[in-house]
Image (cartoon, rainbow, N blue to C red):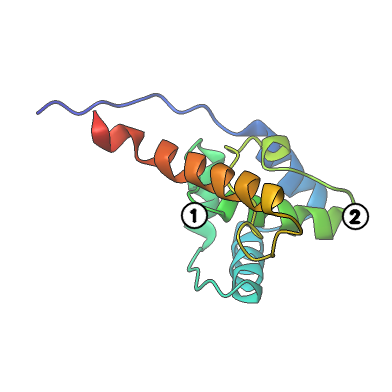
Amino acid sequence: MTERTTPRTPNRQLAALIAEAGFSHAGLARRVDQLGLEHGLDLRYDKTSVTRWLRGQQPRGTTPALIAEVFTRRLGRRLSAQDLGLDACAPVYAGLEFAATPEEAVDIVSGLWRKVSGSHAELRK
């Protein structure tokens, strides 16, 4: 079996925001882990993780949204995962709130289903 490698593009947007926020790589990783704990997640990121993100590796799951929230809190302005050059993912709060109407519940469940089924598309090939 041959390995498929995709060249990664360095994430200049994230690098610029790290500099603007004054984060060290270890400091950013620590804050992402702490925010994860606030949401019941046991994350174990470190300075090497941040280096990988800067080299173009995309964090998985809700991590891009957590990273965006860390920067939002530090810089005092709303930033999305896309603003940081990261792939969009399900919001951190997805599935944690009750829908006000049946229609809203259907919309939420449909959105979550699209996220889950899309994440397994590669496995079906």
Q: Answer with the quarter of the image where residue 66 lies.
A: bottom right
User: x, y percentage for residue 63?
Assistant: 56, 54
Residue lying furthest right: 76
**Circle 2: residue type:** Gly
State the SS at label 2. loop
- Residue at far left of view: 1
| Element carrying mark 1 | helix
Residue found at the far front of this picture: 102
Label 1 amino acid?
Ser
User: Which residue is located at x 24 percent, y 28 percent?
Assistant: 125
Q: Is 76 left, or right, of 5 in this rendering?
A: right
Position of 39 relative to 45 (above/below) = below
Label 2 belongs to which residue? 76
Whole-percent x, y for residue 5 in the image: 30, 27
Q: Is residue 42 above or below residue 63?
A: below
Residue 117 lies, in percent from the top left, at: 41, 40
Q: Nearer the viewer, residue 95 or 60?
A: 95
Judging by the rendered image, the residue that carries numbered circle 1 is 49
Indicate which disc residue 111 carries. none
Badge 2: residue crowd in 10 Å (few <14, some 14–19, many ≥20): few
| Mark positioned earlier in the residue sequence (2 or 1) | 1
